[in-house]
Amino acid sequence: MTALAFETFHLGMRTTRRWLRVPANWISVIFFPLIQLLIFSQLYQQITDLPAFGAEGNYLAYLAPGQVVFAAFFAVSWAGYGLIMEFRSGYLDKLRALPIRRWSILLGEMVPLFFQAAAMAGVLLVISLLLGARIETGVAGFVLILLLSGFFGLAWAGISFVPALVTKSEQATGTMSLIFFPVVFMSTAFVPEAMMPGWMQVVNDWNPITFMIEAIRSLMTTGYDWNVIGVAVLSTAVVGVITQAVTIWAFRRLAN
Amino acid sequence: MQGESKRAPVIEVTDLVKVYGSGEKATRAVDGITFSVAAGELFGFLGPNGAGKTTTIRVLATLLRATSGDARVSGIDVEADPEEVRRRLGLAMQTATLDAFSTGRETLELAGRMHRMPFAEIKRRADELLELMGLTEVAGKLSGQYSGGMKRRLDLAAALVHRPELLILDEPTEGLDPQSRTALWEELERISAAGTTMLLTTHYMEEADRLCTRLAIIDEGRIQVDGSPEELKRGVGADSVIIGLDDADGRSEEERIGVVSRHLDGLVEPGAITAHPSGVSLQVANASQAIPALLRRLEGDSITITGLQMTQPSLDDVFMKYTGRHIRAESADEYIPLGW
């Protein structure tokens, strides 16, 4: 194992323990998308009768992919908070005084986010299945959804890391994560594009969250649509490159 | 410099300068510090908050770049090869810097892993340090649940896992209750006795006095004086010994001084004996060494000793002599910019 991988693994295990040992971390992650899934699926169950809704007859099955993505995002939305706390307490300085690569400190924070996002998406997916949703692509599709969710979480974690590293303010970090809400509300998480006003359809056509939701929706409801999955991976990769490039810049700035 | 040891230096700092900010807002936190610490020494920086102590040790710990000057640990330049320097030092910061969600044992194991120790050795060393620090029973508890004293001891243990050549401690007992402070002092004395070179900063005079084999008084970014605590205190003035005498003998002040002077002839200069409301006051170079001889000479029929009091100059007196003021805990905190 290379030195960087060795250090990242052990520091990543530490940040994973930190995450697991505060139940509020993962309970709150599940709580919001689960409430949306349970309440909206009941409240708007007749929305599927509208002609614009299309062929899908079960609103819970329609909602589930969007809430899986929601869970993946929530899992990482406070990722920068832990970094600020450890910066303030001096623990990051303690890590910096160890004979390790500086990047392994950042990677030790980031790599576990893939697994945290995948795990939270998985929990929501299982609950959706228990409530009546289905995965047409079976176990392989289930695993692929987890991989996509982990990738999505990792890419979007920069939304939390960048303000944390730049401002070193918990408030700024929390506020920036709210940017996700309007973006997800202007996606196909709740209604198909045909039901959106014209301007919102334009936003939706370029919305990377829609691409991921549609990829997961295809795996759950129709089958492997590699074009849709490819677009989701590519768009998430673009988001990831942008957010992580800024994260790395902010980390270097803080480190120097 | 005073008190310089002949052993090879573990720390060598020459003309170290650190300036924060620029232009009118520039703050010269460290202003040309030069000192060295030999192997096995317990060297202390004594000074008020804001004196430049923490900035100096942050440079030595490779956490901060100096504006100019040279700093070496075991002969290695801290800027040229910081990773090699980090391998050789253990660091305990001003507050116990621990991951609150790791247990005591996990904290020590992670430190050992990062120093690339074999796992069997890490386990042995963790057991040994937990035992030494009295933390074995709470080794499985999260460090966030520890008391302040326990956190300090765990922090210290984490800094010692890899048997560092140099242990750097920034205000090691800041914020601790007296009992925990004394316990930690005993711990540090044990570590020092085992041969570990230590550099500590403190603004507690009694801490510097008790622990340090040599210390530097630091103020406004400069070392004002350095030496062993005893040397520094002797440099301020003589010790005082007040001998209480029975006033039932009806002697006048002059007669008392005369009698005492005759008994102490050759041991204490006559001019160093003065009257005191309870007897006489003597000025001697080293009171603790002089008292047995003084008592032997004074014992007899003609003098009845009713009491004995010894006062020595304190490190605060030393600080006063070199800076013109007392060390005050309420001084402004040292300017450490956010960012790392």
Image: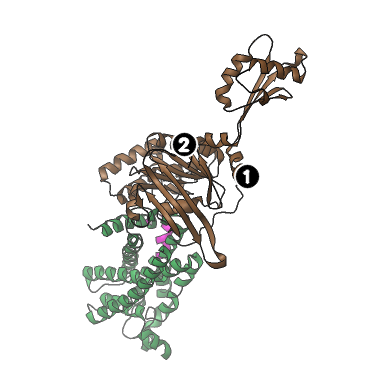
Chain colours: A green, B brown
**Looking at the image, can residue B1 be seen?**
yes
- Give the image location of residue B299, x and y in percent: 63, 12
The residue that appears at 38% across and 72% down in the rendered structure is: A246
- Whether the residues at callouts 2 and 1 have beta carbons within 8 Å, the answer is no
Q: Compare marks 2 and 1 and give the one earlier in the sequence.
A: 2
Horizontally, residue B325 falls left or right of residue B115, namely right
Q: Which mark is residue B60?
A: none
Which structural element holds mark 1? loop
**To which chain does the residue with label 1 belong?**
B
Residue linked to disc 2: B213
Q: Secondary structure at mark 2?
A: loop
Q: Which residue is mark 1?
A: B326
**Part of the protein shown in magenta:** A20-29
Figure check: B76 above or below A30: above
Relative to B164, B150 lies left or right = right
Determine if residue A78 is in view: no
User: What's the residue type where badge 2 is placed?
Assistant: Thr
